[in-house]
Amino acid sequence: MRLVTFSDGGAAKIGVRLGDDIVDVSAAAAAYGGDMIGVIKGGDAAKAALADAAKSGAKTPMSRIKLLPPIPEPGKILCIGRNYAAHAAEGGAAPPTYPEVFVRTPASLVAHGEPLVVPKASPNFDFEGELVVVIAKTCRHVAEADALDVIYGWSLFNDGSVRDYQRKASQWTMGKNFDGTGGFGPDIVTADEVTPGGVGLQLKTIVSGETMQNANTRDLIFPIAKLIFHLTEVMTLHAGDIIATGTPEGVGYARKPPRWLVPGDSVDVEVEQVGVLTNPVVAE
């Protein structure tokens, strides 16, 4: 099942995506708090209720729906740096021996179809297509062998990065958190519809019709289960937390000359079985 959050009259509502259509299932979701985190906490019972509601609900073309990020305000947005060896190499770094983790804030997120914003502060705005893990439930000290049990589903991310600000200090927070620079969506695909662990999925990032990144999740240095093990060794994860699992080689800054995103561009992040996240690019 594919779940979306959309705006209707200023209110955030829950929908089920059926192809290019959306069915409003907010009435069924109300029993689980009415938002995506509540639906995730509701587990199999909530999924069954929403699937049943979608069978008889009216369909609206997705083109007429204003999507929001599937989880508008995740409790945690955890991002993994340099998780593909070839991406580390293109930046002149050795592959990490321990996950490089940073965080993003909800204010940096934009939905599918909404514009990524080149900030006034810098033109050095780069793209990073990524697969996202959505956490199903509260968990701590999760063994790798048990990690798939805490995955609710999958989504897509564009970890838009303002490179000169990323490098102003040893920490990456500033360059990764400009408002409106992180694409997230369009939906959450429940775990039962994707290869377990997200293994062996082809990932592409296409900028204005040109394929820039083309790699496979089997090449992750730290596969999803290992990431969950490392993260939960340190912190408790909760339902609706998300993990952006890292970007492969082909980013703009490593090209000669660099390929920065500019107003008028359009960026597609595509992962097989999960879908396509599309964002235009505008100036602040």
Image (cartoon, rainbow, N blue to C red):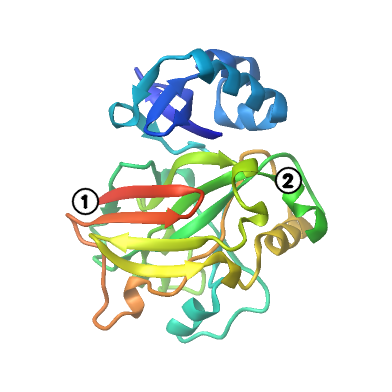
Asked if residue 74 can be seen in this view, the reply is: no
Rendered location of residue 199, percent (x, y): 62, 61
Residue type at numbered disc 2: Val
Residue furthest toward the left? 264
Q: CA distance from mark 2 to mark 1?
A: 37 Å
Q: Does residue 231 lie above or below 139 as drawn?
A: below
Residue at the spot of label 2: 150
Is 28 on the left-hand or right-hand side of 92? right
Residue at the spot of label 1: 282
Q: Quadrant of residue 231?
A: bottom right
Q: Does residue 190 lie above or below 255 as drawn?
A: above
Rendered location of residue 207, percent (x, y): 28, 62
Q: Residues within 10 Å of mark 2 (few under 14, many from 20)?
A: many
Is 126 on the left-hand or right-hand side of 130? left
Give 182 or 136, whichever is nearer the viewer. 136
Residue type at numbered disc 1: Val
